[in-house]
Amino acid sequence: MSKLFNVGQVTGTHGIKGEVKIIITSDNENRFTLGERLYVKNEQERLISLTIIKERIHKNHLLLQFEEISNLTEAEKLKGKYLMVKEEQLPELPENEYYIYEILDCEVYTLDDEYLGKISNIFKTGANDVWEITTEDGKEHLIPFIDDVVKIIQPEEKRILIELMEGLLE
């Protein structure tokens, strides 16, 4: 089964034809275009496919209408639900750029193959991201995501090799 990623949340309805108000949680501006397929889980946790047939801004809200939702009663069932996309719908990133989910839980090793821990969190800063490594004994260390430190990233193997700078793990 494909991984799913939240891209928005339905906060309410608009009108009687089934339009819904959305809070956007995606940084992809093209996510909510005509014909785009989104997914939502129903009450039984089954995945339902929705196809955007109308999108517009109204009073600072994004309004969407789906081919599969034709009235207010059906739209009401979406309130509070998250709209999702499948992993294969994510745009391909440029070389040496990664999605957060690809980096989280990666095992971190030194260039001498010494195991340090796993990436447990990622912090966005102005200059560069900072990765939090949690060791097996629960200690947390912060490492900057810069070329001088992070040498090899293998997201498919969930493995990262770093070069320790003096004082980095103190």
Image (cartoon, helix red, strand yellow):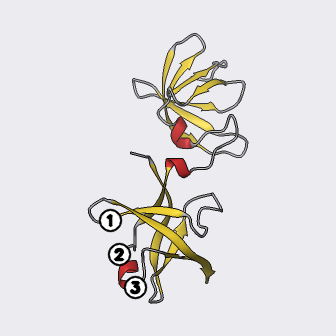
Q: Mark 2 points at which residue?
A: 77
**Cα separation between marks 3 and 1:** 16 Å
In this rendering, is residue 8 above or below 68?
A: above
Does 66 sit left or right of 43 as displayed? Answer: right
Q: How many labels does the image show?
A: 3
Amino acid identity at mark 2: Lys
**Quadrant, the N terminus:** top left
**Cα separation between marks 1 and 2:** 8 Å
Q: In which quarter of the image is residue 111?
A: top right
**Cα separation between marks 3 and 2:** 9 Å
- SS for dot 2: loop
In this rendering, is residue 153 above or below 123?
A: above
Q: Where is residue 21 in the image (x, y as percent from the top left)?
A: 51, 77
The residue carrying pointer 1 sits among few (fewer than 14), some (14 to 19) or many (20 or more) residues within 10 Å by Cα, namely: few
Residue 170 seen: no
Choose the circle earlier in sequence order: 1 or 2.
1
Q: Mark 3 points at which residue?
A: 72
Which residue corresponds to the image point at 36% horizontal and 79% vertical from the top-left?
74
Q: Name the residue under label 1.
A: 42
